[in-house]
Amino acid sequence: MALLTVKNLTKSFGGLTAVSDVNMAIEPGELVGLIGPNGAGKTTLFNLLTGVYEPTTGKILLNTNGKEREIQGQKPYRICGEGIARTFQNIRLFKELTVLDNVRIAMHQNVKYQMLPGAFFHTPGYVKEEERLKKEAEELLDIFQLTHKKDEKAKNLPYGEQRHLEIVRAMATKPDLLLLDEPAAGMNPKETAALTQTIAQLRRDFGLTILLIEHDMSLVMKVCERIYVLNYGQMLAQGLPEEIRNNKLVIEAYLGEDMNA
């Protein structure tokens, strides 16, 4: 059974239909790309999957721990608790907090102590749990080579490292499904190559399922097993990378002839 199933999903804003009758199915452990022109509805779809928007019609089904349930219309924090985490096209870090605290905050939905007595009185259980969270946060930062900057404010990191920190923070919620919204945006080719390897590592080492929005086709074609293509809010095509690369409709709407030159 698919980890995520999207059935006839539609989102309208007044007279504008941003996403129209979209269907998707993502299997556990897959790394799937979502591509299309600017304004195609990709980020709107992410916002529907994560509770930022409520769909006009349609269903979103999540299957974890052998239990499938509808999650459309739930609040973002509840969907995060169900096992879906995301990054944003525009970086949304807590910029005045340290790198380490950005990650620790994301971990607190999974703490094992009672907040009020633990935080106020620093009970032994609270201290032990906070030490565990700190260790796990540093381990995640180490994957992205950010441990040495754990005490710096997030706003002081270079742009590429802020992008990495957003992924680390999403990982800290221990998701089953990770949604990455243009993670390579603004990166140079060397940074993009390193990010490509890291995404593959995250999927391999953590058993993650990943849905990726990205305009860098070299990254998409290297790491994604399947690709969905949106155009004007509708699903234009889906298939293996090579099938998408050679799809005439996709070439005309998005890729262009140069992709296969």
Image (tube, rainbow, N blue to C red):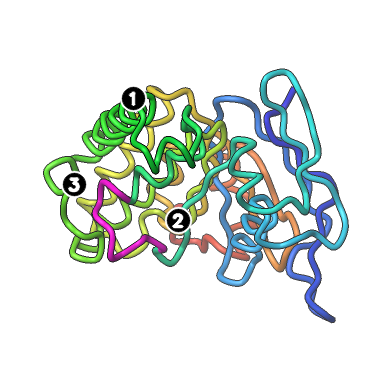
The three-letter code of the residue at mark 2 reads Met
Q: Is residue 95 above or below residue 84?
A: below
How far is mark 2 from mark 1, CA to CA? Answer: 59 Å
Pinpoint residue 183: horizontal percent, then vertical percent.
40, 54
Mark 3: which secondary structure? loop
User: Which label sits on residue 124?
Assistant: 1
Q: Going by the image, does 119 lie left or right of 212?
A: left
Q: Which residues are magenta?
A: 92-101
Q: Residue at x 28, y 59 (%)?
A: 97
Instruction: List x then y, in percent, for residue 16.
Output: 79, 78
Q: How many marks?
A: 3
N-terminal-most mark, 2 or 3 = 3
* Mark 3 Cα-neighbour bin, 10 Å: few <14, some 14–19, many ≥20: some
Which residue was labeled with disc 2? 259
Residue bearing the label numbered 3: 150
Q: CA distance from mark 2 to mark 3?
A: 40 Å
- Nearer mark to the viewer, of 2 and 3: 3
